[in-house]
Image: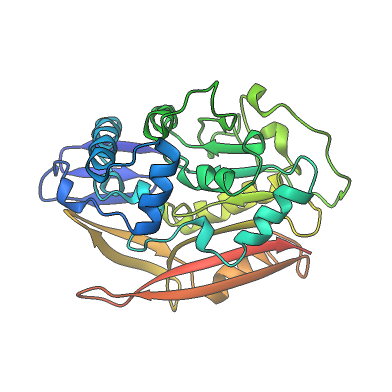
Amino acid sequence: MEGTATHNGSTTLLGDVTFRMASAPTVDSSLYSLSSEQAEFFKAQTGIDDDEDLKRHILEVQAKAYQVAPYPCIRSFVFLRNITFLRLNLSSLSVYEHILELGRKRPDAVLLDIGCCFGTDARKAAADGFPAKNIIASDLFNEFLQLSHELFKTTPASYPGCFLPGDVFDPAFLSIAAPTDDVTPAPAIDLSSLKSLNHLHGRISVINAISFFHLFSEKKQFLVAKALAGLLSAQPGSVICGYHVGSLEKGIVNNSLPGSEYGLFAHSPKTWSSLWDGEVFKKGSVKVETELVEIETRDVQFFMMKWSVMRL
């Protein structure tokens, strides 16, 4: 969750997206829902075995996050699922096993979870074997990163993952650099010492950008893509991936979360692929895969787009 974030009465701005509400909605515990797989994960991570105790714990963290920023995605428990409308996360992407393999086999491979909220994807990757000390979870709000420790019942001493607050549109935190062609493995770096992402140009093996790009205008999506591309290692197999709102034709897509309405700029698979392969990266230097998943809604046709961009 990056970029400008403001709240004023019945209007909330997240990135470039304005959420319009009839009134500022309160937290609604009836929206709470975990699949059996999610419940198993959160129980294993928190040590809370009782369903009601787990629900109570998550609701307490949600209430604190809603005080920090009253986003509809916080109210609707998107931080549990890491994706609006779908109970999917990084582990559901076809490239996930490849990501875990990079963590196992590539010395000092680094995973960046950008716009992470509470860093649930980062925690899942660590639980599945990607070295936690090589994972960075980054969000605009440092309070969300601190609440990650509360949600997962850890401390900076007990969890070795790196939490790095910052704004991707602040050049002091992330400047735009051309994608590197140098495939030489980078020396190890102490992630805990980082103050920005600028020390990691050309050094990151995996960038997870779930529910991220659609928060911005078309122009800003291009700028973020260039900024993240500059971080990606040139070693073959290095990958940027995610999913967000997609469309058959690029343009503004209107939809809603409980209590709010909003419009998002969405790319089509064709325009998303051409953006990465030819505009952001040199044509033919990456492999782009996309998949549109249609979501059932009451009023309109709505798609989420799963995608990955891999260095060749």
Q: In the image, residue 5 lies at what x, y percent?
A: 35, 38
- Residue farthest along the left direction in this orientation: 23
Q: In the image, residue 304 lies at what x, y percent?
A: 42, 68
At 72% from the left and 60% from the top, the residue drawn is: 281
Which residue is at the front of the view, 277 or 162?
162
At 54% from the left and 64% from the top, the residue drawn is: 93
The image quadrant of residue 249 is bottom left
Image check: 303 left or right of 76?
right
The image quadrant of residue 174 is top right
At 56% from the left and 49% from the top, the residue drawn is: 224
At 78% from the left and 65% from the top, the residue drawn is: 285
Q: In the image, residue 141 lies at what x, y percent?
A: 42, 32
Total numbered labels: 0
Image check: 265 left or right of 291?
left
Q: Is residue 222 above or below residue 267?
A: above
Image check: 118 left or right of 241?
left
The image quadrant of residue 142 is top left
Q: Is residue 37 above or below residue 48?
A: below
Q: Residue 3: tell me if it is visible.
A: no
Q: Residue 54: tell me if it is visible.
A: yes
Q: In the image, residue 220 lies at what x, y percent?
A: 50, 51
- Residue farthest along the front direction in this orientation: 49
